[in-house]
């Protein structure tokens, strides 16, 4: 493998790993799992870079998607594990109790939309659509978890997510 | 489930990317992704749409052990530090375009900063179809950026760091997939951030369509067609199609 490629890979890691780690932590809420997810994601990036097609998606969104997918896989696995065993969430001491520190997903959404083309589109969504998308995207919540958080019926949440995504897409396409 | 229906694919793709597609449905969809390009395109489009939301998440520096673990897994054998001879460059390059699309998009535009997806999108849209090569020095630092429009005959070389040829000629070579390197032209030295141009003997497309790498050697005289480099390459990098 050419030396130049390895160095390029390291430069990409240096430029993006902090943001990607932030994304993973926000979903997993645990540093140890987020470290594993980040590692797995970058190994995946190296192994699949040859098949990355510039036309497929933007480089950064490709990286973000790989990290999110890994984080979501780990989240499901961790939840299954916890459901199977007795409650021992503090056993290894790496669970972060950051429920209070984590910025409200709505805040994150506001920050994300500032300065981006997506701003107008998100603002056009109904509040319930916006919030359910934010909870799913930033925290990796499932439909039922979103429903619990918003104290809303499951059916409504599914419809909000569905509508929110459809309207977002229409709006982004028209914004051009 | 009829995966040929575009609306269904789009709905599944959006929920797959968002993360609300779960369990067996998610695994089934991952199978569909492996088999159907239409599904992959739908997913990539949603990755671009939703990926913009990630820009607001505060960065958190990962511990160094993460990078060490990645390196150990990908490159377990100790690396020789000896300078490779130019003959090594003749080995066919694996289709590994890492240094190309990703590095140019991410590192050049915003080295060390988070790159907004819009920056990348806009910079790509602004470029005409071009062949682009990012040549690195021995330390792996980007040194020369060579670019030429696809059907043009002018090659622009931008100097990203100072280059002191010490009285020699900066000779640019193309390293085709198979066969020996062939000379492209002589690069006039310039200060960092400045560019020089050289005339190609044919269009970029004709010269570079089968060339995955470019390299530079320092010569006493401009290389004639059919000549070979007289010494090691001092800069080298991938040559890619940017369209």
Image (tube, rainbow, N blue to C red):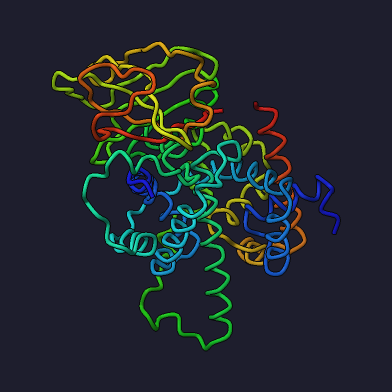
Q: Nearer the viewer, residue B79 or B221?
A: B221
Q: Nearer the viewer, residue B102 or B230?
A: B230
Relative height, residue A78 to residue B96 (above, below): below
Relative height, residue A35 to residue B128 (above, below): below
**Which residue sits at x=70%, y=62%?**
A152
Q: Is residue A107 visible?
A: no
Relative height, residue B196 to residue B97 (above, below): above
**Residue A121: x, y in percent?**
64, 35
**Left or right: where B141 falls relative to B11:** left
Q: Quadrant of the C terminus of chain A?
A: top right
**Residue B38: x, y in percent?**
74, 45
**Which residue sits at x=36%, y=78%?**
A93
Residue extending farthest front: B226
**Residue A103: x, y in percent?**
45, 54
**Left or right: where A146 falls relative to B161:** right
**Which residue sits at x=68%, y=43%?**
B41
**Which residue sits at x=69%, y=54%?**
B33
Q: Is residue A127 visible?
A: yes
């Amino acid at each position: 493998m050419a030396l130049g490629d390895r160095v390029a890979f390291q430069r990409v890691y240096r430029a993006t790993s902090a943001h990607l780690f932030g994304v993973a932590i926000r979903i997993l809420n645990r540093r140890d799992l987020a470290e594993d997810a980040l590692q797995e994601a970058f190994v995946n990036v190296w192994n699949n870079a040859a098949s990355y097609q510039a036309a497929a998606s933007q480089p950064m969104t490709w990286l973000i998607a790989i990290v999110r997918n890994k984080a979501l896989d780990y989240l499901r696995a961790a939840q299954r594990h916890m459901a199977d065993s007795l409650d021992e969430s503090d056993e290894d001491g790496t669970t972060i109790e950051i429920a209070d520190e984590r910025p409200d997903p709505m805040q994150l959404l506001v920050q994300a939309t500032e300065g981006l083309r997506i701003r107008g589109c998100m603002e056009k969504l109904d509040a319930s659509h916006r919030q359910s998308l934010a909870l799913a995207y930033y925290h990796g919540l499932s439909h039922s978890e979103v429903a619990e958080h918003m104290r809303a019926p499951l059916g409504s949440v599914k419809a909000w997510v569905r509508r929110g995504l459809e309207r977002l897409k229409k709006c982004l396409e028209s914004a051009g | 489930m009829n995966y040929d229906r575009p609306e269904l694919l789009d709905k599944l793709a959006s929920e797959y990317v968002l993360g609300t597609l779960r369990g067996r449905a998610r695994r089934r969809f991952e199978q569909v992704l492996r088999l159907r390009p239409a599904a992959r395109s739908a997913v990539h489009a949603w990755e671009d749409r939703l990926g913009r939301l990630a820009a607001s998440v505060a960065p958190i520096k990962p511990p160094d052990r993460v990078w060490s673990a990645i390196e150990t897994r990908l490159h377990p054998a100790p690396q020789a530090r000896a300078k490779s001879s130019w003959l090594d460059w003749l080995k066919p390059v694996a289709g590994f375009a890492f240094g190309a699309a990703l590095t140019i998009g991410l590192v050049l535009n915003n080295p060390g900063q988070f790159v907004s997806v819009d920056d990348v999108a806009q910079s790509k849209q602004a470029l005409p179809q071009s062949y682009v090569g990012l040549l690195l020095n021995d330390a792996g630092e980007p040194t020369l950026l060579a670019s030429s429009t696809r059907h043009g005959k002018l090659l622009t070389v931008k100097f990203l760091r100072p280059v002191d040829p010490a009285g020699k000629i900066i000779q640019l070579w193309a390293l085709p997939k198979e066969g020996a390197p062939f000379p492209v032209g002589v690069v006039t030295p310039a200060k960092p951030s400045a560019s020089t141009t050289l005339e190609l003997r044919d269009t970029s497309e004709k010269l570079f369509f089968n060339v995955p790498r470019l390299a530079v050697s320092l010569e006493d005289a401009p290389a004639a067609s059919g000549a070979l480099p007289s010494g090691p390459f001092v800069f080298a990098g991938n040559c890619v199609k940017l369209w």
